[in-house]
Image (tube, helix red, strand yellow):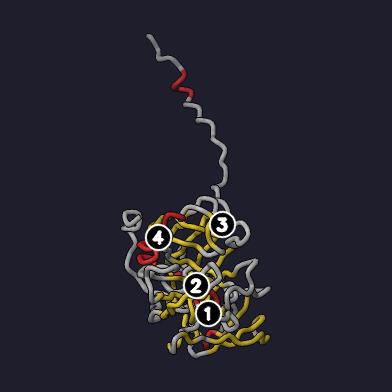
Amino acid sequence: MPAVLRLLRRGLVVAALVAAGAGIGVFGAAALREDGSKASARTAPLPAAVPPSIDYSPRAARGNRLQRPGTSVVAQAKGRSLPVFERPGRTRGRIFARRIDGQKLPLAVLVRGRSHPRGWVPIMLPGRARRPEAWVRRADVVLSANDFRARVELHRHRLLVWHRGKLIARAKIGVGQAVTPTPTGRYYVTDLLRPKDPTGLYGPYAFGLSAYSPVLTDFAGGNGQLGIHGTNEPQALGTDVSRGCVRVANSVITRLARTLPLGTPVTIVRRTPQPPHRKRRAAPRPPASWLTPPSLA
């Protein structure tokens, strides 16, 4: 597995992307075991790190890295809470940053799309919101570009990671069982926690996702938040083994923790997307001169 990930570049470490109402989840102050019991070891959040602030105005976006395929944008709140709007000008509510083990975690969300009204930013809320699409004021957030993205392929039990459109990592994974499936859809990384026991159930690191279990709404004190984490059962990788989380080898999660930036998009699919079928074109006929025998004169 280390050979597969040797191309991973050391990058920014994710720490905390959580909306209010997300609750403790599976990566709260008390780590939760997938057998339903509480783990004795507590988790500690890692320091926050985000890419440099960028100009997200339409004028600046033309011709810059925001137009590059595979680049996403993350909005980090300037304060400890963030007003959220149903649409520009219509209030929807407020989301709050949370605290774990006495440490304040930053509040950030994934930006959707590239076009937006002046002074507003469209975002995706984490959690089980019926309408995850919302808006925030541009003045309330700092925007950062992210060139990483990941895809989880459930039927192949594998995780793929790209950087600037180039595949840099491929890893075997364990996914949800039939009765507690891993949901499909487009999500993003919300947390990065480091368990006190690196040899425990979650391994040395655990990413929280904006995805939640479709069947477990109240699990062992949490609310069913799913994630990508290490494992103490590497022999189970490549099978449907979890309560919905994605398990990877400890060597893999360690490299990902040092590489994936804040808010990395994670797409979970049932089957690998197939490229559109293209009909084979008939070979062009050669010029008529090729068919005419040369003169024998």
The reply to whether the C-beta atoms of the residues labelled 1 and 2 are less than 8 Å apart is yes
**Residue on which the image places disc 2:** 208
Secondary structure beneath dot 3 equals strand
Residue drawn where x is 60% and y is 68% of the image: 213
Secondary structure beneath dot 4 equals loop
Q: For the residue carrying disc 1, how many other residues have a C-alpha within 10 Å: few (<14), some (14-19), or many (20+)?
A: many
Amino acid of disc 4: Ala
**Residue on which the image places disc 4:** 249
Residue drawn where x is 49% and y is 59% of the image: 151
Residue drawn where x is 36% and y is 67% of the image: 254
Q: CA distance from mark 3 to mark 4?
A: 20 Å
Which one is in front, 282 or 30?
30
Amino acid of disc 2: Gly
Q: Residue 123: image x %, image y %?
A: 57, 76
Q: CA distance from mark 3 to mark 1?
A: 23 Å
Q: CA distance from mark 2 to mark 4?
A: 16 Å
**Residue on which the image places disc 3:** 269
Which one is in front, 211 or 265?
211
Q: Is residue 170 left or right of residue 139?
A: left
Is residue 258 among the parts visible in the rendering?
A: yes
Amino acid of disc 1: Val
Closest to the camera, between mark 4 and mark 1, is 4
Amino acid of disc 3: Val
Q: Is residue 54 above or below residue 34?
A: below
Going from N to C along the chain, the mark reached first, 2 or 4, is 2
**Residue on which the image places disc 1:** 18
